Image (cartoon, coloured by chain):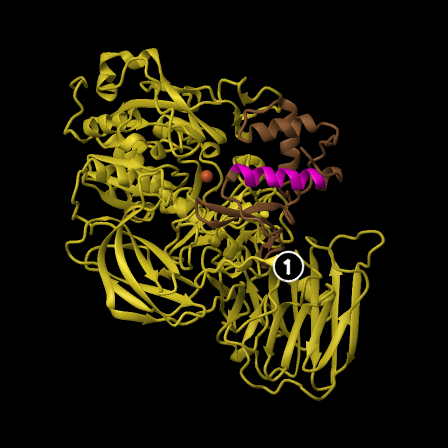
């Protein structure tokens, strides 16, 4: 008998906005499963790593929530994207009507999937046009069902579907036609019947849903459709398939005659949550739980890859049963940030007497204009979002080959695998095989908890522990602040530090960092694989990151052809490199390789001995190897590494101060670095498989220092922070915090 | 649509090559010979559903072997063994995979 392993996770929470400031109030939302009460406290995070050989787990107590324990309660999550027509009065009272749409199912045969409906599940009345359990098109009216049988519908093929309901004569019919004729399959399938009078829809106010139908419980919707739906339309009267199809394919936004009661053109206001009715009846609606928009429709002909230039070829929405945006939990406690709170990484820690614990991270940054230090640490919340609740270890074959050891699963990863309702990361596939391109923070993000999942968030806190160790004051600014406020979020700081893996960058973030650097700002980029994906945020979707991917880069999934432009702003997504901005052009180095199994060290270059760079190597012997130690793979060069390359935009005045050595067989050249697949592309044989430490100056006394390695910051704590990685980092930081870097020529 | 590889590992494992298993036993973290690397990649690229994982019993201290199930299902335990060494757990998974892929028990 197999034994199921329980995660023992019984308490989880999130807050309404993980960015806050002195004087602001945060609302915390908690769900407990079998927990009556818990205590909550607020702390400033110095190191979130439980590793006994690391800097040491440390959260400085700041405040207690309430005088006694708080009451626990269960709060559910309702995933599944669909569209709802809130004002459906215009669609009521029809005795004879038809509904039609173009559909592209992605999981036919896996459960009932409603295409359009007005269904009251408790009373079992109303109607649903849907794919039934075995993937046939079915029309349910009250207790009557009519099924268009024949060959099963094929996934990822376009169909026109039509249902007609004639309450006057007690008849109903359903029909579908495939767009592409495939020998041996039925192009058309139809069925009709007489309605059983029992259970017929009384004209009660049942909402009109697209891609789902009403459920009994508080979720409000169920039977989610998996796949694309385009131009759903309601006709008055019994329409023929031909007439309906003619209308749907005309793409007309000007509706003739009065027979069209509603027709939603998803190509309109594609960058919003609204869906617009073009019938003139004003029956508009909205999408729920972030289905994917700006996706190709039935008529996409590849003449354009950008929805902005051919919107009429992007009239579809791709719905998923496992989409989730906002858990929408009630608030369980609040905390107002004191006026004198230090900026930093913070967390609410929740604990029960029985030993349950949860950790809800957030970031306190100064209010605009209230800078408290010369240094800003950039909390890479875009990266934290992109990786939020990643399922790579349990969904992707290659994850173990990549890590070259059996994957470890923490309690949170057990929980995430079993509780898919918490949603996925931009590294994951939806259950229908399409890539996840939105990630939200309005849900518990379990990849930001102390535990064995140390990537990004926990590794980044090693840098905070080091700053604390050297008593260096700093403010924390988040990626999202830079996206919102532009360079204003950074101006005034003499230096900024970007952390171990600032991989995701919006255009506004890129422009702000570039502007900061060119206006005298100094930037220590202490990570690897940074400034890699072009992503976007959107004012209408607070807390959501959008990430589209093409056919290159470390993409985990590959975007559908024609769907590389982002919904949020129309910009091309994918690699910054393919958008003409390789990371080298911003920070001197850009991603070249992975080395997950083992890390290595740096060795200084000849150029580094120039007097110009003496400041960086003070206290470091001329022959010392740098960083042959560390808590990730035993070295400061590892996991993902970046190389200097003038062809890819490393500035002409940039200098390589040190390079990784002994990368060996563990280093693997990244896919975008292959013009042609050949042998001999590992670190033993290929010179591009390396990390470069680079320095360059920028106009107005600015400067950039890059290490091009994810494992740099996790080497800082070695030997009680007394080591050459910490020394070099401190040397450069001290220099960067001077009003003007010494040794720099005037003018 | 392009899907990430699901079941593409084809390198055959020769049950006679117990010497490779011995090499792994003696040096779990490597570096390994080229033939052993091929064998390890073959083992590590087994299908995701049913793949062995190490479930953390106590962070940085104790592990047990589990198998990945379908989405929305709890991870299943393989046996009752608890390991306090990651290398020992890694070796135990190697033994299980040897048996799965060759049909023979590894007795070394
Ligand atoms: Fe990454």
Q: Nearer the viewer, residue A332 or A293?
A: A332
Q: Is residue A24 above or below residue A535?
A: below
Q: Which residues are magenta?
A: B87-99
Place of residue A159 in the rendered image (x, y in percent of width and height, measured from the top left)? 70, 59
Question: Principal SS element in the magenta part?
Answer: helix
Place of residue A75 in the rendered image (x, y in percent of width and height, measured from the top left)? 44, 69
A303 sits to left or right of A452: right
Image mark 1: chain = A
Q: Residue at x 25, y 17 (%)?
A: A613
Q: Report if the beta carbon of the residue with label 1 is closer than 8 angstroms to ligand 1.
A: no
Q: What residue is shown with label 1?
A: A250
Q: Quadrant of residue A193?
A: bottom right
Q: Residue at x 52, y 42 (%)?
A: A549
Residue B91 counted in the magenta span: yes
Q: Is residue A212 above or below residue A724?
A: below
Q: Residues within 10 Å of mark 1 (few under 14, many from 20)?
A: few
Q: Which chain is brown?
A: B
Q: Is residue B48 above or below residue A334?
A: above
Q: Which chain is yellow?
A: A
Q: Residue furthest right?
A: A184
Residue A538 counted in the magenta span: no
Q: Nearer the viewer, residue A342 or A70?
A: A70
A673 sits to left or right of A70: right
Q: Residue A16, can we see it?
A: no
Place of residue A37 in the rendered image (x, y in percent of width and height, measured from the top left)? 35, 70
Place of residue A137 in the rendered image (x, y in percent of width and height, measured from the top left)? 72, 67
Q: Residue at x 36, y 35 (%)?
A: A714
Identify the secondary structure beneath mark 1.
helix
Quadrant position of the N terminus of chain A in the picture: bottom right
Q: Residue at x 56, y 22 (%)?
A: A681
């Amino acid at each position: 008998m197999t034994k199921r392993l329980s995660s023992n996770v019984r308490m989880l929470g999130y807050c309404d906005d993980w960015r806050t400031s002195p004087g602001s109030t945060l609302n915390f939302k908690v769900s407990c499963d079998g927990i009556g009460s818990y205590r909550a406290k607020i702390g400033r995070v110095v190191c979130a790593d439980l590793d006994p050989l690391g800097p040491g787990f440390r959260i400085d107590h700041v405040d207690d929530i309430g005088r006694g324990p708080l009451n626990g309660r269960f709060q559910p999550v309702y995933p599944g994207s669909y569209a709802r027509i809130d004002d459906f009065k215009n669609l009521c009272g029809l005795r004879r009507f038809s509904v039609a749409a173009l559909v592209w199912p992605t999981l036919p045969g896996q459960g009932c999937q409603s295409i359009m409906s007005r269904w009251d599940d408790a009373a079992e009345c109303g109607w649903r046009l849907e794919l039934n359990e075995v993937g046939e098109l079915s029309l349910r009216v009250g207790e009557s069902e009519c099924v268009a049988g024949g060959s099963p519908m094929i996934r990822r093929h376009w169909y026109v579907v039509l249902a007609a309901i004639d309450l006057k004569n007690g008849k109903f019919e359903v029909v579908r036609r495939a767009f592409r004729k495939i020998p041996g399959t039925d192009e058309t399938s139809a069925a009709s019947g007489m309605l059983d009078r029992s259970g017929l829809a009384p004209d009660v106010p049942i909402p009109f849903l697209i891609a789902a139908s009403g459920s009994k419980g508080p979720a409000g919707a169920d039977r989610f459709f998996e796949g694309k739906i385009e131009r759903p339309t309601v006709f008055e009267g019994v329409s023929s398939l031909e007439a309906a199809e003619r209308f749907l394919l005309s793409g007309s936004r000007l509706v003739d005659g009065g027979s069209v009661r509603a027709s939603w053109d998803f190509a309109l206001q594609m960058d919003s949550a609204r869906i617009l009715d073009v019938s003139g009846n004003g029956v508009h609606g909205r999408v729920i739980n972030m289905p994917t928009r700006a996706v190709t429709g039935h008529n996409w002909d590849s003449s354009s890859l950008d929805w902005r230039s051919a919107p009429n070829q992007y009239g579809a929405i791709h719905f998923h049963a496992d989409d989730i945006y906002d858990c929408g939990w009630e608030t369980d406690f609040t905390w107002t940030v004191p006026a004198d709170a230090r900026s930093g990484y913070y967390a609410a820690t929740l604990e029960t007497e029985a030993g349950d614990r949860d950790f809800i991270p957030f970031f306190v940054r100064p209010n605009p204009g209230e800078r408290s230090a010369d240094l800003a640490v950039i909390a890479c919340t875009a990266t934290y979002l992109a990786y939020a609740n990643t399922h790579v270890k349990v969904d992707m074959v290659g994850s173990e080959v990549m890590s070259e050891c059996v994957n470890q699963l923490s309690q949170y990863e057990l929980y995430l695998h079993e509780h898919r309702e918490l949603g996925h990361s931009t590294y994951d596939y939806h259950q229908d095989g399409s890539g996840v391109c939105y990630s939200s923070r309005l849900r518990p993000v379990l990849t930001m908890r102390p535990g064995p999942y140390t990537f990004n968030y926990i590794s980044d806190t090693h840098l905070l522990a080091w700053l604390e160790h050297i008593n260096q004051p700093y403010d924390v600014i988040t990626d999202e602040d830079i996206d919102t406020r532009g360079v204003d979020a950074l101006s005034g700081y003499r230096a900024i530090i970007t952390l171990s893996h600032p991989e995701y960058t919006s255009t506004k973030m890129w422009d702000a960092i570039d502007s900061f650097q060119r206006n005298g700002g100094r930037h220590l980029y202490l990570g690897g694989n940074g400034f890699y994906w072009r992503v976007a945020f959107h004012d209408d979707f607070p807390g959501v990151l959008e990430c589209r991917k093409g056919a290159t880069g470390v993409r985990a999934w590959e975007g559908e052809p024609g769907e590389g432009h982002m919904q949020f702003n129309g910009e091309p997504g994918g690699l910054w490199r393919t958008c003409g901005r390789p990371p080298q052009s911003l920070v001197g180095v850009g991603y070249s390789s992975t080395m997950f199994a083992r890390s290595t060290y740096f060795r200084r270059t000849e150029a580094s001995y120039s007097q110009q760079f003496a400041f960086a190597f003070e206290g470091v012997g001329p022959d010392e190897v740098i960083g042959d130690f560390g808590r990730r793979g035993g070295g400061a060069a590892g996991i993902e590494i970046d190389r200097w390359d003038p062809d890819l935009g490393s500035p002409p005045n940039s200098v390589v101060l040190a390079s990784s050595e002994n990368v060996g067989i563990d280093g693997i050249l990244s896919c975008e670095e292959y013009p042609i697949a050949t042998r001999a592309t590992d670190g033993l044989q290929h010179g591009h498989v390396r990390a470069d430490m680079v320095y360059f100056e920028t106009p107005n006394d600015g400067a950039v220092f890059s290490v091009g390695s994810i494992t740099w910051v996790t080497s800082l704590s070695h030997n009680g922070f007394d080591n050459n990685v910490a020394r070099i980092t401190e040397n450069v930081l001290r220099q960067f915090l001077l009003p003007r870097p010494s040794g720099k020529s005037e003018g | 649509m392009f899907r990430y590889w699901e079941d593409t590992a084809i390198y055959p494992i020769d049950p006679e090559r117990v010497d490779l298993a011995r090499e792994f036993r003696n040096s779990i973290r490597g570096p390994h010979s080229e033939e052993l690397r091929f064998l390890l990649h073959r083992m590590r690229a087994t299908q995701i559903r049913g793949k062995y994982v190490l479930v953390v019993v106590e962070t940085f201290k104790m592990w047990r072997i589990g198998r990945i199930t379908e989405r929305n299902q709890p991870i299943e335990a393989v046996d009752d063994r608890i390991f306090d060494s990651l290398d020992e757990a890694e070796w135990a998974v190697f033994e299980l995979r040897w048996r799965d892929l060759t049909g023979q028990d590894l007795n070394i």
